[in-house]
Amino acid sequence: MLTTTNRQVLLAQRPDGIPQNEHFRIVETEIPPLKIGEVLVRNEWLSVEPAMRGWVNSVGNYSKPVGIGEVMRSFAAGRIVASLHPDWDVGTPVTGMFGWQEYASVPVSAISRKVGEEDLPLSTSLGVMGINGVTAHYGLLEIGQPLAGQTVVVSTAAGAVGSLVGQIAKLYGCRTIGITGGETKRQLCLNAFGYDIALDYKSPDFESQLRTACENSVDIYFDNTSGAISDTVLMQLALNARVVICGTASIPSWTPPPQGPRVERHLLVKRARMQGFVIFDHDDHEPKARADIARWLREGGLQYREDILDGIENAPDAIAGLYRGENLGKRLIRLHKGV
Amino acid sequence: MLTTTNRQVLLAQRPDGIPQNEHFRIVETEIPPLKIGEVLVRNEWLSVEPAMRGWVNSVGNYSKPVGIGEVMRSFAAGRIVASLHPDWDVGTPVTGMFGWQEYASVPVSAISRKVGEEDLPLSTSLGVMGINGVTAHYGLLEIGQPLAGQTVVVSTAAGAVGSLVGQIAKLYGCRTIGITGGETKRQLCLNAFGYDIALDYKSPDFESQLRTACENSVDIYFDNTSGAISDTVLMQLALNARVVICGTASIPSWTPPPQGPRVERHLLVKRARMQGFVIFDHDDHEPKARADIARWLREGGLQYREDILDGIENAPDAIAGLYRGENLGKRLIRLHKGV
């Protein structure tokens, strides 16, 4: 028997920079009547992404910002509980852009895919088997183009994307150096994610540690942070290096753009390439990425961590928490105990 | 009958930044005895390159700096006047790294090539048919990857490299926007080099002119300047833009690296690529580039300008003059009237 009420997290104010608790509000609403061609999804897992900062800021980004008063845009995973579309049956596990809410009445175009890997937990469809896995796979392999024996440096090395980049680089025979914040995450990098070297950027002699570890031999820098960490890594590039720009977690606001050392001369002298990407452009890469990742998971070659918050009331502060560095692994909101 | 004396331009002091007149001195020396395997080249043309700044600075560059007291490193073109190598005959026109001097006693490994295009002036082997042409061809076509209908912006648009980039982009069906300094060069861009739009960066409303011309549609930015010009162009990138880093003429010194707006977020949002290159890595590209350029020259599809200074005594100040923007076209030192 279906409930008729829904809890939703709405964007209440537009932040400049990192969205905080007070930029959202939780409301209780009626589930609207389902239209022909729609399905009703009961969300079980809501995703929390660093990229959400960009989705709610008004400028300098790659997608239309979430409107004030709208349900917060989000990947979610759940099961279809009602369907007015002949191709989508009740009970089907699905993932898609269902938003931060308990129930989503959506056209089937909002569904990213039926989750077909029944041996893997549904939550993985939002992390290692979802946007994080595809991002790591595409960014490292297609833009970074690693070769065995090369050195790969990853910032936010213990994070949902970074931890996968480090491990995929190892699977490709690279030497991996992870940069993360704090001793707990540093140990996780070494022990769970197999980095050859892991460095704490909060350490007072981080710069000299990094120089010693890198010795101008960085072939690929997978950059999730920008800022001072990147400035230090960039000085250690090898000839023909590739800098994969995946995220800018260390910069609180880009309006106006903060200043940093100019990179042009260094890119020239090192014959280096710096390239940004947005994974939503590369849907065609998803099947290959997911097939590789599922195989590595089943073979035990890929580890992942999840950071689970129970209850939708934890969502509003969850993005800010990512930027405070408090999560160990892919941050998820679990809506129902026992899923 | 050969002379036995030689005039040479030596690096007298190491500049920090742009080399000036006082960093060089001219000496008269005896031509040394020729060793087996060497040739004596009588230089007719000496090249003057913006890149020479990098060749004499001590740090942050791509080749070993010229030593104090050594002959200034330079491309030159001339004819073999004595040979102790069986493959190289007296009278052969050659180009290579012969240095800023009247005569070069060099091993044949210093020869870049025999100049075979007898219908083209020997001086072109240093410019449009030499490093400038190959640089423009490689940087635009291999790194920039232009497609017909795309917008290409070139800084130092009237310069020895920039003027060729703009014209090759037109040959590939692109819309071209040239940025240069002063009305004379702006007219040259429009009338000789066929730019669709040419802008004077010294104009008080340059930024708004550029915004109007570009309208976020810059598919390729061929960057010879870095600095404020680049900052303005970068804000006008189209999605999937390519920024070709060829030179950094607007920055007087890179020690320490000057500050500028961070590019990471913008590269990410625009899915853009910024890539440096050094043409000396791409010898294998030379034959193709030279074949294309010779064909375009003969068909009349490619214009070039030369800025000729008569006499080796003009060499010491000639690099600084490039950075003062005083040349119109490829700057050359002519050693003998009537060549």
Image (spheres, coloured by chain):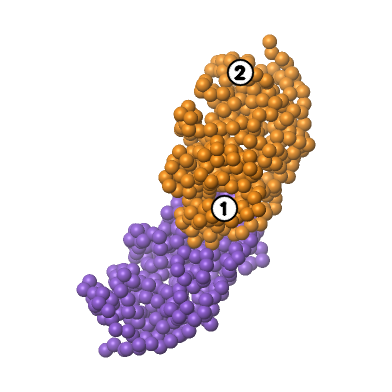
Chain colours: A purple, B orange
Q: Name the residue: 54% across, 55% down.
A: B212
Q: Secondary structure at mark 1?
A: helix
Q: Nearer the viewer, mark 2 or mark 1?
A: 1
- Residue B210, numbered circle: 1
Q: Out of B11 and B167, give the one closest to the viewer.
A: B167
Q: Residue furthest left?
A: A86
Q: Name the residue: 56% across, 72% down.
A: A17
- Residue A80, numbered circle: none
How far across and down, in percent of the image, does residue A223 sit? Answer: 53, 60
Q: Name the residue: 57% across, 28% down.
A: B124
Q: Is residue A20 left or right of residue B105?
A: left
How many badges with numbers are in the image? 2
Q: Quadrant of the N terminus of chain A?
A: bottom left
Task: Say yes or no: labels 2 and 1 on the same chain.
Answer: yes
How far across and down, in percent of the image, does residue A181 sit? Answer: 57, 69
Q: Out of A185 and B28, give the one closest to the viewer.
A: B28
Res A265 seen here: no
Q: Is residue B77 above or below residue B60?
A: above
How far across and down, in percent of the image, does residue B216 sit? Answer: 50, 56
- Residue B80, numbered circle: 2
Q: Amino acid at mark 2?
A: Ile
